[in-house]
Image: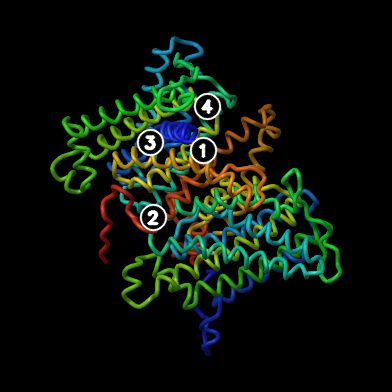
């Protein structure tokens, strides 16, 4: 009995890592500019589409490099065309602007790259392997590509942490995150910093798109998967990188366990036409959580003054 | 010259508090409503009814509903589609299970059910705000969508999961032609708009606006956040629920939960951004705009003679919407309603220079 549950748990945790990857992009931008970037999901889709289509015509590494350039160009375009004109607007206006950006990117990506399902082949082993056969009868079934995704995610987080903590740019980023005006007054150029953050978020989106794309195929639904990063953010707190990771793990494991354990119970009780509670479980979990800790697990305490 | 505030002498409190204190405004509104009731049936074709007029009117109700919540009370909601679904399925089930119920009661029931669900999902707004609340309303959206797709009772155990409304009649008159549907929807729109307009300029509306502008300050001057926020959620969901029921009954006829997915939520949100946050007129302008742009885009390739596949058109539609949202936020954050107000300003002196 315990074996399958552990298997679900591990599968969920590994999916959670992928959620964290998307959430990481959100956190980076929110920390540095206070913009709640709804377009992160669209950026994931766009990056994955670019990579998938480019790698059809050129070697994978060249396509990857080109996609990185595309994402940097995209960051520049967003900063130059949208954000620059919306400085000093309320957060909610900026949020809606990124909603517009998300719509544009969804349409734009599919217009130039096509809207079929494309494949990204990372050359990862596809066949599930069994581990810990000595502990559980029959062992646990896991997908090695998800394990590799988890490793990549860990490396990415480590790199970002070092980048934020020890480089000159990273220090400037943290200064901007703390206080825009103070940062500006000591001579940190805000627009460069924002460009930098959006570019980094774009590259994080590319990594996320790559992993999701390899798992599910590159298609429009990737943008919807990215919506799942929102409850992750709520759970972890909008401003916390460790929060995004822990939140992702909780949501990933929680929704898979709920599907397996709670799903059949609900179906029996309410005579449902199938389960699928993982569609909303993450949101409900986050909602319940918010009622007790409005700032999330690791978020800064919200202090309000008139 | 033609449009001015001067020369209107108000001699009673009633005149002072009229919805449209200016004679010209009053006539204009009366003329528009009269034209909608009498003139439109003469010129409109079947296509115009089903593709333009009815969708615009119904979505206007939803936009007004969301505007009350987001534009007036400042609570961003991404759950509009879910609340519309509540209205649609509530109306369907009442009409199905108690077929003798008057149609007006059916729609009221839809509104009330959506209102109850709205209050329930509005409860978190007392603890959280802003983006956090937006994500919390996403929970409503996904949960409700799932609920109507999975719980068989709501769809009357239909194997396909889609439901269809039967004969619709009001006081014995069958509502079967697009024209009758249009007139009925129009009548409902007029009543609801009047109610909304009065609501927002009274005590309740001011309470909401105070909440929107700064909630802590509002609390300190004695506005109870519980009352303000939950009443906004209640009234907003009531409108959205009725819009959902009308959408199901008069626009779709038969539908499945997918008709009320998250894109519907975004569509209505775009309407109020483009139309103007915190404006009843803006809700109408935004709804008309959002409904007409795709129709226009679909016709455009025919007119200029370039063959474009429908898939590409739907992608271009996404792009156009995205660009327009950003453009409006940059150029005119108060939306089309603000353009209308600027136009009126200009009319005060036109055609003279000053």
Comparing B72 with B298, the one in front is B72
Horizontal arrangement in the rendering, residue B239 relative to residue A42 (left or right)? right
Comparing A147 with A300, the one in front is A147
Residue B238, above or below A196: below
Horizontal arrangement in the rendering, residue A184 relative to residue B274 (left or right)? left
Give the distance between the C-alpha atoms of the residues marked 3 and 1, in whole angstroms: 15 Å
Question: SS of the residue at dot 4?
Answer: helix
Q: Which residue is mark 1?
A: A224
Compare marks 3 and 1 and give the one earlier in the sequence. Answer: 3
Instruction: Same chain for labels 1 and 2? Say yes or no.
Output: yes
The answer to whether any part of residue B48 appears in the image is: no
Q: Which residue is mark 4?
A: A216
Query: What mark, if any, has residue A290 been given in the picture?
Result: 2
Instruction: Same chain for labels 3 and 4? Say yes or no.
Output: yes
Q: Which residue is mark 3?
A: A20
User: Of all residues shown, which one is farthest toward the top?
Assistant: A59
């Amino acid at each position: 009995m315990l074996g399958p549950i552990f298997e679900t748990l591990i599968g969920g945790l590994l999916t959670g890592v992928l959620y964290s990857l998307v959430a990481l992009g959100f956190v980076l931008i929110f920390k540095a500019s206070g913009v709640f970037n709804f377009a992160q999901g669209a950026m994931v889709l766009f990056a994955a589409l670019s990579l998938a289509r480019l790698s059809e015509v050129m070697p994978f590494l060249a396509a990857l490099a080109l996609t990185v350039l595309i994402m940097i160009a995209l960051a520049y375009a967003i900063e130059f065309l949208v954000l620059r004109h919306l400085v000093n607007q309320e957060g909610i206006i900026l949020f809606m602007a990124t909603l517009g950006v998300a719509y544009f990117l969804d349409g734009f990506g599919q217009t130039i790259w096509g809207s079929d399902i494309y494949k990204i082949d990372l050359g990862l082993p596809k066949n599930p392997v069994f581990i810990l056969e000595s502990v559980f009868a029959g062992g646990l079934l896991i997908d090695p590509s998800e394990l590799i995704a988890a490793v990549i995610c860990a490396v990415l987080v480590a790199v970002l942490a070092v980048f934020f903590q020890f480089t000159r740019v990273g220090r400037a980023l943290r200064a901007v995150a703390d206080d825009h005006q103070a940062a500006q007054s000591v001579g940190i150029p805000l627009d460069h910093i924002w460009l930098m953050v959006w570019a980094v978020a774009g590259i994080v989106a590319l990594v996320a798109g790559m992993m999701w794309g390899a798992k599910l195929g590159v298609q429009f639904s990737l943008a919807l998967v990215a919506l799942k990063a929102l409850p992750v953010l709520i759970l972890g707190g909008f401003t916390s990188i460790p929060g995004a990771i822990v939140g992702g793990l909780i949501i990933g494991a929680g929704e898979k366990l709920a599907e397996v354990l709670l799903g059949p119970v609900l179906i029996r009780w309410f005579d449902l036409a199938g389960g699928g509670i993982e569609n909303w479980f993450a949101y409900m979990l986050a909602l319940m959580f918010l009622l007790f800790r409005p700032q999330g697990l690791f978020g800064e305490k919200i202090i309000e003054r008139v | 010259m033609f449009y001015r505030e001067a020369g209107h002498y108000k001699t009673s409190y009633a005149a002072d508090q009229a919805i449209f204190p200016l004679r010209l405004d009053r006539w204009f509104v009366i003329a528009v409503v009269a034209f909608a009731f009498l003139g439109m049936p003469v010129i409109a074709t079947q296509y115009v009814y089903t593709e333009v007029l009815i969708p615009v009117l119904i979505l206007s109700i939803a936009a007004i509903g969301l505007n009350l919540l987001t534009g007036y009370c400042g609570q961003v909601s991404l759950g509009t589609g879910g609340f519309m679904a509540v209205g649609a399925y509530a109306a369907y089930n009442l009409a199905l299970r108690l077929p003798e119920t008057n149609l007006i009661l059916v729609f009221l029931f839809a509104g009330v059910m959506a209102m109850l669900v709205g209050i329930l999902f509005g409860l978190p707004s007392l603890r959280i705000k802003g983006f956090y609340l937006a994500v919390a309303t996403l929970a409503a959206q996904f949960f409700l969508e799932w609920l109507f797709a999975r719980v068989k009772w709501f769809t009357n155990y239909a194997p396909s999961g889609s439901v269809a409304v039967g004969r619709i009649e009001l006081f014995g008159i069958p509502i079967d032609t697009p024209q009758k549907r249009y007139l009925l929807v129009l009548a409902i729109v007029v009543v609801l708009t009047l109610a909304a307009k009065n609501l927002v300029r009274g005590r309740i509306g001011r309470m909401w606006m105070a909440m929107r502008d700064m909630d802590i300050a509002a609390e300190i001057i004695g506005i109870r956040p519980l009352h303000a926020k939950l009443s906004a959620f209640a009234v907003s969901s009531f409108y959205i629920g009725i819009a959902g029921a009308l959408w199901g009954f008069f626009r779709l006829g038969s539908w499945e939960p997918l008709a009320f997915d998250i894109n519907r939520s975004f569509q209505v949100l775009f309407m109020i951004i483009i139309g103007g946050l915190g404006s009843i007129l803006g809700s109408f302008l935004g709804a008309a705009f959002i409904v007409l742009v795709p129709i226009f885009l679909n016709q455009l390739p025919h007119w200029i003679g370039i063959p474009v596949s429908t898939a590409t058109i739907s992608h271009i539609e996404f792009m156009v919407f995205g660009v327009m949202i950003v453009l409006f936020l940059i150029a005119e954050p108060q939306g089309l309603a603000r353009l209308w107000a600027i136009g009126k300003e200009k009319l005060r002196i036109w055609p003279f220079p000053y």
